[in-house]
């Protein structure tokens, strides 16, 4: 393969940057003179650890298939996302298992999809049964964690289960956390009404993440203590936050980023599938009956609760850049921070996988706009369904 050299304004630093790509890896990162305002920004591809679906691709489809996951990979790449975790939400044991198997099939059968899919996030079913913290997860399928069910997930997608979100209030949460951590899975606290002691117990057992902190919560909470303060203060929990302009008000988002600056914070989209029928007001696989409000928020018809997001990380980066006044700080929350959670090897350095994003952005714009996206050194526009190599390309 011939080496390829890309140039742009350094999105993570100052001046310009030259990136050389060979054999799917970064072979050189060289600072250059500032190429000027007309040049694109250049930086690593975005990494999203919580994607329920996107456009017509749905990780929670009623009829799961590898094609849904491939469609997610293709449409997300157009927004600069080079790696993501398809996220399976609360459903019956059989439905959740079928969706996990569909993701495994997608990774095994397509090189392009295997490059983009970094694993699986299972959000549920052991979440709060209370209105508010449960969000739009179906009450009928909320259940305590069972080691036997967790084992079926591991068996259905060997090596792919990366994150499981649970509420620590359930009996067996500590045992489930220890089991998952022992199998290399990150455990996240989310959709919870757990007490300080219950949260601390699963953290002591190995939980290391908070799922979309500040959402999946009661509308009204005690001033203190409450489960948000507990997670904000817990140095062992890195927090995912949704920066789509709807899930968290500006002041709340800015405060959470500041509070977690030394503990770990990263952006997620919580995006859901939005096929044409849904965009015209229909039934979502995440939350049931929903409508797309005038402000661009996807809300449950009956409760008004947010039912995931229709925005992607390109919006999240621009939102945080506006709040912090720093593009580089915002981009890190969608690149190096989630890469650290995955812990899959070197990131944005010589020898790392060449996930490269060239994009346009100016202060005040609502999203960054990708010009070109490389996934493992290959153009994202060429996401063909060639058979995956043994072991994939993750």
Image (cartoon, grey):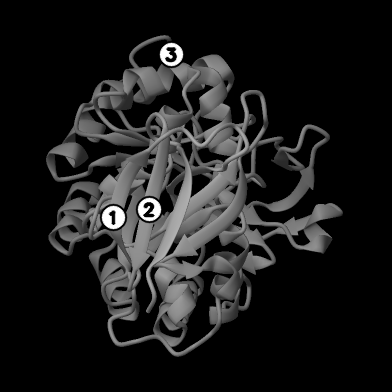
The residue that appears at 29% across and 87% down in the rendered structure is: 390
Say if 84 sits above or below 331 in the image. Answer: below
**In the displayed structure image, the side of residue 30 where residue 10 appears, left or right:** right
Q: Which residue is mark 2?
A: 19
For marks 3 and 2, give the one nearer the viewer: 2
Helix, strand or loop for disc 2 = strand
Helix, strand or loop for disc 3 = loop
Q: Which residue is mark 3?
A: 222
Q: Earlier in the sequence, mark 3 or mark 1?
A: 1
The residue that appears at 17% across and 56% down in the rendered structure is: 181
Q: Which residue is mark 1?
A: 28
Say if 177 sits above or below 192 in the image. Answer: below
At label 3, counting other C-alpha atoms closer than 10 Å, the crowd grade (few under 14, some 14-19, many 20 or more) is few
For marks 3 and 1, give the one nearer the viewer: 1
Residue 191 coordinates in the image, percent (x, y):
44, 40
Which mark is on residue 373? Answer: none
Q: Residue furthest front?
A: 33
The residue that appears at 28% across and 47% down in the rendered structure is: 341
Residue 361 coordinates in the image, percent (x, y):
61, 35
Q: Earlier in the sequence, mark 1 or mark 2?
A: 2
Find the distance from the CA under tag 3 to the CA under tag 1: 52 Å
Quadrant the C terminus occupies: bottom left
Q: Nearer the viewer, residue 48 or 227?
A: 48
- Residue 191 visible? The answer is no
Residue 211 coordinates in the image, percent (x, y):
40, 41
Helix, strand or loop for disc 1 = strand
Q: Quadrant of residue 4?
A: bottom left
Give yes or no for contact between labels 1 and 2 (Cβ–Cβ under 8 Å).
yes
Q: Residue furthest right?
A: 280
């Amino acid at each position: 393969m011939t080496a390829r050299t890309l140039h742009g304004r350094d999105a993570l630093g100052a001046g310009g940057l030259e990136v050389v790509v060979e054999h799917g890896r970064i072979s050189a990162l060289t600072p250059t003179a500032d190429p000027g305002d007309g040049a694109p920004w250049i930086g690593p591809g975005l990494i999203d650890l919580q994607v329920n679906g996107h456009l017509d691709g749905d990780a929670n489809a009623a009829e799961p298939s590898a094609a849904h996951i491939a469609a997610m990979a293709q449409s997300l790449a157009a927004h600069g996302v080079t790696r993501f975790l398809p996220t399976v939400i609360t459903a019956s044991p059989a439905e959740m298992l079928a969706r996990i198997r569909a993701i495994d099939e997608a990774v095994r059968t397509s090189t392009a999809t295997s490059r983009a899919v970094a694993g699986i996030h299972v959000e549920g079913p052991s979440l709060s049964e209370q209105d508010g913290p449960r969000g739009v997860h179906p009450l009928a399928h909320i259940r305590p964690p069972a080691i036997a069910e967790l084992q079926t997930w591991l068996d259905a997608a060997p090596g792919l289960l990366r994150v499981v979100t649970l509420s620590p209030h359930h009996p067996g949460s500590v045992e489930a956390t220890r089991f998952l951590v022992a199998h290399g899975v990150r455990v996240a606290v989310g959709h919870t009404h757990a007490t300080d002691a219950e949260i601390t117990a699963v953290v002591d057992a190995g939980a290391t993440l908070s799922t979309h902190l500040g959402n999946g919560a009661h509308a009204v909470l005690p001033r203190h203590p409450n489960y948000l303060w507990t997670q904000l203060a817990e140095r062992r929990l890195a927090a995912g936050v949704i920066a789509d302009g709807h899930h968290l008000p500006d002041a709340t988002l800015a405060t959470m980023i500041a509070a977690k600056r030394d503990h770990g914070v990263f952006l997620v989209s919580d995006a859901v599938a939005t096929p044409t029928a849904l965009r015209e007001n229909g039934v979502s696989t995440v939350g049931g009956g929903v409508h797309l409000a005038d402000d661009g928020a996807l809300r449950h018809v009956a409760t008004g609760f947010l039912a995931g997001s229709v925005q992607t990380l390109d919006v999240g980066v621009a939102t945080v850049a506006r709040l912090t006044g720093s593009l580089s700080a915002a981009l890190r929350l969608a690149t190096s921070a989630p890469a650290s959670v995955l812990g899959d090897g070197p990131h944005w350095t010589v020898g790392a996988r060449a996930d490269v994003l060239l994009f346009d952005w100016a202060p005040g714009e609502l999203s960054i706009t990708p010009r070109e996206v490389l996934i493992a050194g290959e153009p994202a526009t060429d996401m063909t369904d060639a058979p995956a190599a043994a072991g994939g390309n993750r």
